[in-house]
Image (spheres, coloured by chain):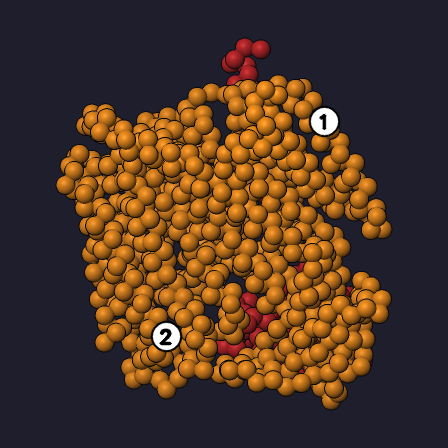
Chain colours: A red, B orange
C-alpha cells in the first residue's frame, strides 16, 4: 500500500467512525426525547399514547387521594382550563402539595388516567416548575381568546 | 461601611486586572522587560484586593448584616455559623466572587512557581489570566455586585435553601470551582503559546502539572457533589444527568482528554494543535458550566433572556473568550505546527482515539443539556432529555475508552505490531473475559450489562497488575525488585492509580445498577420489612428540635439472620423560616453494600409513615474510584522530574533568555 492510499484509508476510517458515533448519539437522542404536554393539549388528543411524556400544572385542591395500600396516590393535574387524573405509586417528593405546581413523567393509559413513573416537585417553596408555569400561561391565553370571540 | 469597602476593593482589583491583562502582554510583544515585570506585582495586588472583598462578604454573612441584599436573601440569624459562611457562595453574586478569588489564587500560584519560565512566557500567561479576571470583575461590578445594599434593611434574612445546609455545601463548591478555574491556567498557557508561536516539549512540561491539579480538583469536586446528592436528596441516586451535573462533567471529559494529549505533546512533541484546542475547550466548558448553573438560565430561559444586562453580558463574555481564542487558534495554529508522525498501531493512536471518544462524549452531553434550552428559548416547545438518552450514549462510547485505556500503557510510542500486542495481553484478556462471564452467575442474575461492566473493570485490574509486575521484573541484571520499585517515577504511579480508580468506579456503577433493590413500604411502630436478606424494624418516631428546624426522627433497627447490623435514624425536617420540608436519609455504609433508609410522608389519620428502603451493592466504590483518580493525579503532578527540570532551567536561564530574544523580535 502506498502512503497516499494509507492516508486515504485512515481519513475514510475516521470519517466513518465519526459518522457512526453521530448516528448513535442522534438516534439515542431521538428515541429518548421526552416531550411536555399541558392538560389542555392532552384533552385535545395532541399527546401520544404508549410513549413517555411529561405533564405539568397545578395539583387540584382536594383531589389528592390515597389508595388502601397507603402507597398509591391519585390526584388531578389542572391548568385551570382542563383536568387530567394521575395515579402514582411510591413516596411523593417533599414539596408535593395541593394547589402547588407539579411535573410528572409517565404514560397515558387507555382509560384517560396518566400513570406517572416519576413525580417532580422542586425544592423551593416559591419555585414553580417552568413546565407547570408554561401550561398555566397557555391555558390562560386560550381562555382569553375564547372570551374575545 | 464594610460592604462599601468590599465594593471599593473590587473596583481596585478590576483596575489592577486591567493593568495585569494589558501591560505584560504588550511587553512580551515588544520585548520590554519593564512592562513584563508588571505582571507579578499586579497579580499579587489584585489577589490582595479580591481577598479583602471576599473577607468583607464573609464578614457581612457572619455578622448578619441584613442591609446587604445578598445576605438578606441567602442567610438567616438562626443559621449555624459554618452555613452562614458557606451561604456566601450559595448565591449567584457570591459564587462569582468565589470564582474571582480562585482565579487570583491560581494566578498567584503561577507567579510563585513560574520563576524558571522564560520571562515573556510567564508575562503572557499571567496577562491572559488578568484578562479573564477583568471579565469576571466587570461582570460582578456591573450586573451582580455582591455588596448591593437593601435599604431599608430587613429584620432577618430569608435563610439558605435547606437543601444546601449541609457540610457538602462547605466543601463541594470551592473544590469544584478550583477545578473549573484551574483550567484557566492551561488555557492561559495555550494562549501564550499561540501568541508567542512557540510550542514544544518544554511548554507541555510546564503546563502538565497545572492541568493535572485542576483535573484532580474537578474530579474530587464532582465526586463530593455526587456523594452529597446521594445522601441528601433521599432517594439514593448518585448521578441524575441533571444539567447542573452535566455542566461539571463536560469540562471533566475534555480535561481528561487534555491531560493525555499533553502527555503525548511532552513525550513525543506531537498532537500540538490538538492540545491547544483541547485547552481552549476545557476552559470554555468551565465558563459555560459556571454560567449555566449560576445565571438562572436553567430555572427559566425566558426570565434569563428578559434580564438584558446579565444575559447579554454573559453571552458576550462567552463569545469573546471562545470566539476570540478560536480565532487566535485559526490564525496562529499553523505556526505552532502539528508535530511528528506516528504509526497506525501505536500508543499515540490509542491516546488519539480515546481523545476523540471523550470529545464525542462531551459533545453528546452538550447536545442533551443545551438543546432543550434552545428549543425553549425559541418557543419551539418544551422537551426534556433524561437519563435513558445519556445511558444509551455513554455505554457504547465509554466501552472502547476503558478497553483502550488498559492497552495504551503496553503499546509502544511511534509504532507497534498488533499481533505482538495481542500476544502480550492474551492472558489478561482471557482471565478478565472468563471471570466476567462467570462471576454474575454466582448472584443468580446474569445480565449482559453486568457482564460487560465487570469485564471492563477486571480488564483494567488484570492489565494494571501485569504492568506493575513487568516493571518490577525488569531485566535480570539491573538491581533488586526493591530498587526497581523505588525507581518507578511518580508519573507512572499516578497513571497506574488513576486507571485502577476508573476500574473501581466501573465496578461500583455496574453492580449498583445491576443489583440494587428498593422498597416503598407503609410502616407503623413495631412493623417490619424485608429487603435483600435484611430485616428492618420500625421502632417509632420522636420529635427533635434543631437550630432552625424541627424534625420527626424515626428509629429503625436492622438485623440480618437475627444478628444486629445497624440502628438507623432517618429524619423528616421542617425548616421553620422557609416552611420547607426536607428528607434526611440514614445510611449504613459498608465495603460491599450500603443500606439506605429515608422517610416519605406520614399517612394522615394514622401513626404510620411511608418509608423508603434501599439496598445498594458496591455503591461506595463509585466514589472510592474517584478518590483513587484524585490521589493518582496528585502523585503525578508531584513527580520529581518537574522540579528537577525547573532547577535545570533556572541554572540555564541566561542562555535561554538570550536565545528567546530573536524569536520574539521576529
Q: Residue at x 40, y 43 (%)?
A: B210
Mark 2 or mark 1, earlier in chain: 2
In depth, the one of B424 and A118 nearer the eye is B424
Q: Residue at x 49, y 60 (%)?
A: B172
Q: Is residue B139 shown above or below B613?
A: above
Q: Describe residue B355's horizontal placement relative to residue B90 as left or right.
A: right
Q: Quadrant of the C terminus of chain B?
A: top left
> Would you identify the image quadrant in which residue A132 lies?
bottom right
Q: Callout 2: helix, strand or loop?
A: helix
Q: Describe residue B373's horizontal placement relative to residue B140 as left or right.
A: right
**Are both tags, 2 and 1, on one chain?**
yes
Residue lying at the far bottom in this picture: please name it: B605
The chain carrying label 2 is B
Q: Residues within 10 Å of mark 2 (few under 14, many from 20)?
A: many
Q: Residue at x 62, y 59 (%)?
A: B238
Q: Where is residue B435? Give x, y as percent.
A: 78, 39
Q: Where is residue B651? Give x, y as percent.
A: 28, 31
In depth, the one of A144 and B613 nearer the eye is B613
Residue pointed to by mark 2: B61
Q: Where is residue B502? Give x, y as percent.
A: 61, 44
How far, Cα to Cα, is label 2 from label 1? 61 Å
In depth, the one of A87 and B562 nearer the eye is B562
Residue pointed to by mark 1: B426
Q: Where is residue B217? Give x, y as percent.
A: 47, 51
Q: Quadrant of the N terminus of chain B?
A: bottom left
Amino acid at each position: 500500500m502506498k502512503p497516499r492510499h494509507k492516508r486515504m484509508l485512515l481519513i475514510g476510517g475516521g470519517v466513518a467512525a465519526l459518522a457512526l458515533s453521530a448516528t448513535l448519539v442522534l438516534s439515542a437522542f431521538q428515541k429518548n426525547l421526552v416531550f411536555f404536554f399541558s392538560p389542555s393539549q392532552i384533552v385535545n388528543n395532541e399527546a401520544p399514547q404508549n410513549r413517555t411524556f411529561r405533564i405539568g400544572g397545578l395539583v387540584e385542591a382536594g383531589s389528592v387521594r390515597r389508595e388502601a395500600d397507603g402507597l398509591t396516590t391519585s390526584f388531578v393535574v389542572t391548568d385551570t382550563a382542563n383536568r387530567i387524573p394521575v395515579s402514582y405509586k411510591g413516596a411523593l417528593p417533599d414539596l408535593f402539595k395541593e394547589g402547588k405546581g407539579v411535573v410528572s413523567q409517565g404514560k397515558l393509559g387507555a382509560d384517560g388516567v396518566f400513570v406517572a413513573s416519576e413525580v417532580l416537585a422542586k425544592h423551593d417553596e416559591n419555585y414553580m416548575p417552568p413546565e407547570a408555569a408554561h401550561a398555566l400561561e397557555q391555558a390562560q391565553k386560550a381562555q382569553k381568546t375564547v372570551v374575545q370571540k | 461601611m464594610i460592604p462599601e469597602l468590599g465594593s471599593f476593593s473590587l473596583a481596585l482589583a478590576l483596575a489592577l486586572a486591567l493593568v495585569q491583562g494589558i501591560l505584560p502582554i504588550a511587553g512580551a510583544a515588544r520585548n520590554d522587560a519593564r512592562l513584563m515585570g508588571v505582571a507579578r506585582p499586579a497579580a499579587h495586588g489584585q489577589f490582595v484586593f479580591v481577598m479583602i472583598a471576599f473577607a468583607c462578604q464573609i464578614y457581612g454573612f457572619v455578622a448578619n448584616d441584613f442591609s446587604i441584599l445578598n445576605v438578606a436573601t441567602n442567610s438567616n440569624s438562626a443559621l449555624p455559623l459554618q452555613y452562614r459562611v458557606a451561604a456566601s457562595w450559595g448565591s449567584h453574586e457570591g459564587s462569582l466572587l468565589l470564582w474571582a478569588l480562585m482565579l487570583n489564587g491560581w494566578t498567584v500560584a503561577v507567579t510563585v512557581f513560574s520563576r524558571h519560565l522564560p520571562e515573556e512566557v510567564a508575562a503572557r500567561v499571567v496577562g491572559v489570566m488578568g484578562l479573564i479576571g477583568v471579565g469576571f470583575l466587570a461582570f460582578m461590578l456591573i450586573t451582580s455586585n455582591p455588596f448591593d445594599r437593601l435599604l431599608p434593611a430587613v429584620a432577618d434574612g430569608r435563610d439558605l435553601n435547606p437543601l444546601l445546609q449541609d457540610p457538602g455545601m462547605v466543601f463541594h463548591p470551592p473544590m469544584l470551582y478550583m477545578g473549573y478555574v484551574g483550567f484557566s491556567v492551561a488555557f492561559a498557557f495555550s494562549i501564550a503559546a499561540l501568541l508567542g508561536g512557540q510550542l514544544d516539549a518544554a511548554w507541555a512540561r510546564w503546563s502538565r502539572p497545572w492541568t493535572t491539579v485542576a483535573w484532580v480538583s474537578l474530579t474530587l469536586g464532582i465526586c463530593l457533589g455526587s456523594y452529597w446528592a446521594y445522601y441528601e436528596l433521599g432517594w439514593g441516586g448518585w448521578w441524575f444527568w441533571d444539567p447542573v451535573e452535566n455542566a461539571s462533567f463536560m469540562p471533566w471529559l475534555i480535561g481528561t482528554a487534555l491531560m493525555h494529549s499533553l502527555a503525548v505533546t511532552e513525550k513525543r512533541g506531537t498532537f500540538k494543535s490538538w492540545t491547544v484546542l483541547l485547552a481552549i475547550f476545557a476552559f470554555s466548558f468551565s465558563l459555560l458550566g459556571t454560567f449555566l448553573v449560576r445565571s438562572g438560565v436553567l430555572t427559566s430561559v425566558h426570565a434569563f433572556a428578559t434580564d438584558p444586562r446579565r444575559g447579554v453580558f454573559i453571552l458576550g463574555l462567552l463569545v469573546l473568550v471562545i470566539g476570540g481564542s478560536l480565532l487566535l487558534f485559526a490564525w496562529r495554529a499553523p505556526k505552532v505546527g502539528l508535530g511528528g508522525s506516528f504509526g497506525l498501531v501505536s500508543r499515540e493512536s490509542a491516546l488519539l482515539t480515546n481523545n476523540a471518544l471523550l470529545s464525542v462524549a462531551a459533545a453528546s452531553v452538550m447536545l442533551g443539556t443545551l438543546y432543550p434550552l434552545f428549543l425553549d428559548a425559541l418557543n419551539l416547545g418544551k422537551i426534556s432529555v433524561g437519563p435513558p438518552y445519556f445511558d444509551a450514549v455513554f455505554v457504547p462510547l465509554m466501552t472502547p475508552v476503558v478497553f483502550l485505556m488498559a492497552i495504551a500503557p503496553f503499546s509502544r510510542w511511534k509504532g507497534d505490531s498488533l499481533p505482538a500486542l495481542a500476544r502480550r495481553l492474551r492472558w489478561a484478556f482471557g482471565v478478565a473475559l472468563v471471570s466476567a462471564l462467570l462471576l454474575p452467575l454466582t448472584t443468580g442474575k446474569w445480565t449482559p450489562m453486568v457482564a460487560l461492566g465487570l469485564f471492563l473493570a477486571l480488564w483494567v485490574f488484570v492489565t494494571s497488575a501485569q504492568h506493575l509486575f513487568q516493571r518490577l521484573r525488569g531485566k535480570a541484571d539491573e538491581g533488586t525488585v526493591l530498587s526497581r520499585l523505588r525507581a518507578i517515577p511518580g508519573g507512572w504511579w499516578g497513571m497506574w492509580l488513576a486507571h485502577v480508580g476508573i476500574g473501581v468506579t466501573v465496578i461500583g456503577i455496574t453492580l449498583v445498577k445491576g443489583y440494587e433493590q428498593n422498597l416503598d413500604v407503609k410502616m407503623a411502630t413495631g412493623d417490619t420489612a424485608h429487603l435483600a436478606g435484611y430485616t428492618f424494624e420500625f421502632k417509632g418516631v420522636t420529635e427533635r428540635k434543631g437550630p432552625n428546624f424541627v424534625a420527626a426522627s424515626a428509629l429503625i433497627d436492622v438485623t440480618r439472620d437475627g444478628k444486629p447490623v445497624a440502628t438507623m435514624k432517618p429524619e423528616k425536617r421542617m425548616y421553620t423560616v422557609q416552611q420547607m420540608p426536607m428528607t434526611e436519609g440514614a445510611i449504613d455504609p459498608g465495603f460491599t453494600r450500603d443500606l439506605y433508609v429515608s422517610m416519605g410522608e406520614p399517612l394522615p389519620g394514622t401513626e404510620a409513615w411511608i418509608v423508603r428502603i434501599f439496598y445498594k451493592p458496591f455503591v461506595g466504590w463509585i466514589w472510592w474510584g474517584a478518590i483513587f483518580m484524585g490521589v493518582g493525579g496528585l502523585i503525578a503532578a508531584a513527580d520529581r522530574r518537574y522540579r528537577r527540570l525547573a532547577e535545570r532551567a533556572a541554572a540555564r536561564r541566561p542562555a535561554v533568555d538570550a536565545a528567546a530574544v530573536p524569536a520574539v523580535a521576529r
